[in-house]
Amino acid sequence: MQIEFVDLARQNKLLFRNYSKIIAGVVKEANFIAGSEVNVFESTFAAFCGKKYAVGVNSGTDALLLSLIAYGIGRGDEVITAPNTFFATVEAIHATGAKVIFADIDPATYTLNPQQVAKKVTSRTRAIIPIHLFGQPTDMDPLLLLAQKYHLKIIEDCCQAHGARYKGKLVPYSETGAFSFYPSKNLGGFGDGGIVVTDNALIAAKVRRFRNHGASQKYTHEVFGFNSRLDTLQAAILNFKLKHLVNWNRLRQKHSLFYIELLQQLTQLQLPKPADFTTHVYHIFAITTPHRHQLQKFLRSRGIATGIHYPVPLHLTRPFLAQGHKRGDFPIAEGTSKRLLSLPMFPELKQTEIKYIAATIHEFFRLKKSSRP
Ligand SMILES: Cc1ncc(COP(=O)(O)O)c(C=O)c1O
């Protein structure tokens, strides 16, 4: 059996007619930038998140960057985040001129540990970016208390958490969050895309201006901005896909429960154990094992693709080593990066496939045990 890590073609085949019709509609109207679908999607997605405003941009990276700039973060400022995220989170901070400050993570949820964040606050700290990694929200209330105490901004990196909840409330839990619509996300487009959602009218207005060359009206450039618009075709596709998001997330949750049921006897594995106060939407189903590389190789030999999120904690990448970071700085993030393995996860995954993947993992540990001297 061959199983992809994420099989987008399977979903596209099922919904091919719908997608063709949507694309044909956009082509017919030929309003490829700022077409009516962009406004419709922005208001629908804002309502979905329970937020007042949403501004479409061209990627999750820009959603973070434009939010940070809108909050006035720049040179001389420090922004605290976790070292176990996709590089884009720190690129956005760096692009504002601010300094990236890492804090270690919680070993059970892999999300930012508020106690570690508290230790990193200085007089230069201006913001925190918690990452709702793999689809699981960060413990937000302690971070909000810190933010209140030290007058910090919080921008939630929701790029992996469309539809996830913290204490029953959809993310972003606080004022502002950034989403990515990279094709493999829980809600993904047919190319790059992103959105900023916020309850703050001023932040929404600023992001709207920044994404369009600093202009609120054509050729009226009030500030230096960017070309970072969500295009009409992406908005039209996302509008349609948004109707499926809740069901797709339910399927991801169902698949995860099935994985857990089939793998829970294996004491050599740490399985996802969502905190009580979160609703995990399983963008990624990650297990940990000290035998990660061997298990990945074994699964590959049986036709099962897997992923590693992420192989190198960011403080050990070249730009941060150059700033003086070293091995041992963030032991939890370093330890998990050596052991995490992401199993196939997408809504259209079949129960027979999950059974096959689980049986292959059992076989790996059986063989490992019997080969011991
Ligand atoms: C946690 C996280 N932050 C930021 C991003 C950046 O999003 P994009 O690829 O849309 O720029 C991603 C996407 O991969 C992500 O997973």
Image: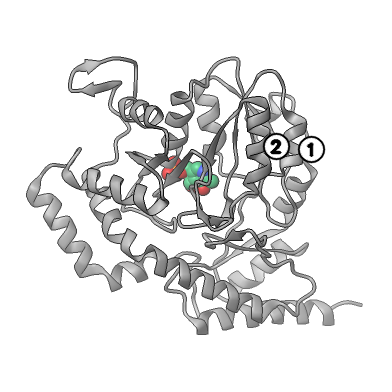
Tell me residue 15's x, y (percent): 27, 69
Question: Label 1: few (<14), some or many (≥20) within 10 Å?
Answer: few
Indicate whether 335 appears above or below 6. above
Tell me residue 11's x, y (percent): 34, 69
Is residue 212 left or right of 273 when viewed as pictured? left
Q: Disc 2 marks which residue?
A: 316
Q: Please tell me the numbered disc located at residue 71.
A: none
Of callouts 2 and 1, which one flags the residue occurring earlier in the amino acid sequence? 2
The amino acid type of the residue labelled 1 equals: Arg
Q: Secondary structure at mark 1?
A: loop
Q: Secondary structure at mark 2?
A: helix
Q: Nearer the viewer, residue 34 or 297?
A: 34
Is residue 28 left or right of 296 when viewed as pictured? left
Point out the residue furthest to the right here.
373
Q: Nearer the viewer, residue 269 or 361?
A: 269
Q: Disc 1 marks which residue?
A: 327
Q: Quadrant of residue 340?
A: bottom right
Mark 2–mark 1 Cα distance, whole angstroms, equals 7 Å
The residue under the point 40% across, 39% down is 196
Contact? badges 2 and 1 (CB < 8 Å) = yes
Indicate whether 320 appears above or below 260. above
> Can residue 275 be seen in the rendering of this structure?
yes
Tell me residue 298's x, y (percent): 66, 72
Tell me residue 138's x, y (percent): 62, 49
Q: Is mark 2 within 8 Å of ligand 1?
A: no
Is residue 296 left or right of 217 when viewed as pictured? right
> Can residue 7 be seen in the rendering of this structure?
no
The amino acid type of the residue labelled 2 equals: Leu
Is residue 208 left or right of 127 when viewed as pictured? left
